[in-house]
Amino acid sequence: GTLVVMSAAIRNWIKRPTGPTTTPFWGPVANWGFVVAGIADSQKPAERISPNMTAAMCIYSLLFMRFAWAIQPRNYILFACHASNEAVQLNQMRRYVEWKGSDAGKAADRIAAEQASFAASAVSDASKIK
């Protein structure tokens, strides 16, 4: 009775074009690593966030959300994975922007500018030595 119906449902799920024996299943499952890493990174200081990499991850996930929706059959696992990653990455970008506008972010900019100026003058002075 119930066992036969359940085993038929499981067998049908396994044989689907996006079932657990296919790349369209395991690729998105592996991509959940991006989401887990992003969540873990949300516990780190905001000054360690790379805005360039975060923006790249946002674009990447947007493109793959579109791809997952456009292909047939639709890959809902891939779509959910990249929608989740998009949310995580946008949160990281929000954290970075808030930090950058804070007093700590402005101080870090001043220090970086001073270091760059010092390095440039050191190179200039070194080039004058004969």
Image (cartoon, rainbow, N blue to C red):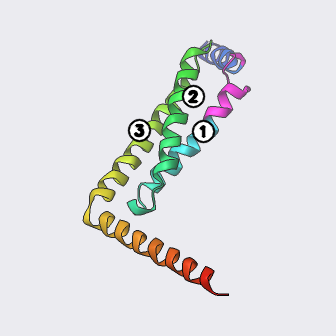
Residue denoted by label 3: 87
Q: Say the numbered circle drawn on residue 12.
A: none
The picture quadrant where one finds residue 47 is bottom left
Q: Is tag 3's residue or tag 1's residue first in the polypeptide sequence?
A: 1
Quick one: which residue is furthest to the bottom in this view? Answer: 130
Q: Nearer the viewer, residue 62 or 129?
A: 129
Q: Amino acid at mark 2?
A: Leu
Q: Is tag 1's residue or tag 2's residue first in the polypeptide sequence?
A: 1
Secondary structure at badge 2 equals: helix
The picture quadrant where one finds residue 10 is top right
- Mark 1 packing: few (<14 Cα in 10 Å), some, or many (20+)? some
Per the image, is 42 magenta? no
| Left or right for 89, reference 98 | right
Q: Is residue 20 shown to the viewer in this render?
A: no
Secondary structure at badge 3 equals: helix
Q: Which residues are magenta?
A: 15-28
Q: Is tag 2's residue or tag 3's residue first in the polypeptide sequence?
A: 2
Q: Nearer the viewer, residue 57 or 25?
A: 57
Between disc 2 and disc 3, the foreground one is: 3
| Left or right for 91, reference 1 | left
Q: Is residue 36 above or below residue 72?
A: below
Distance in Å between CA atoms under marks 3 and 1: 14 Å
Residue denoted by label 1: 31
The x, y position of residue 82, in whole percent, is 51, 33
Per the image, is 18 magenta? yes
Q: Amino acid at mark 1?
A: Asn
Mark 1 touches mark 2? (CB < 8 Å): yes
Q: Amino acid at mark 3?
A: Ala
Q: Is residue 72 above or below residue 61?
A: above
Residue denoted by label 2: 78
Q: Is residue 98 shown to the viewer in this render?
A: yes
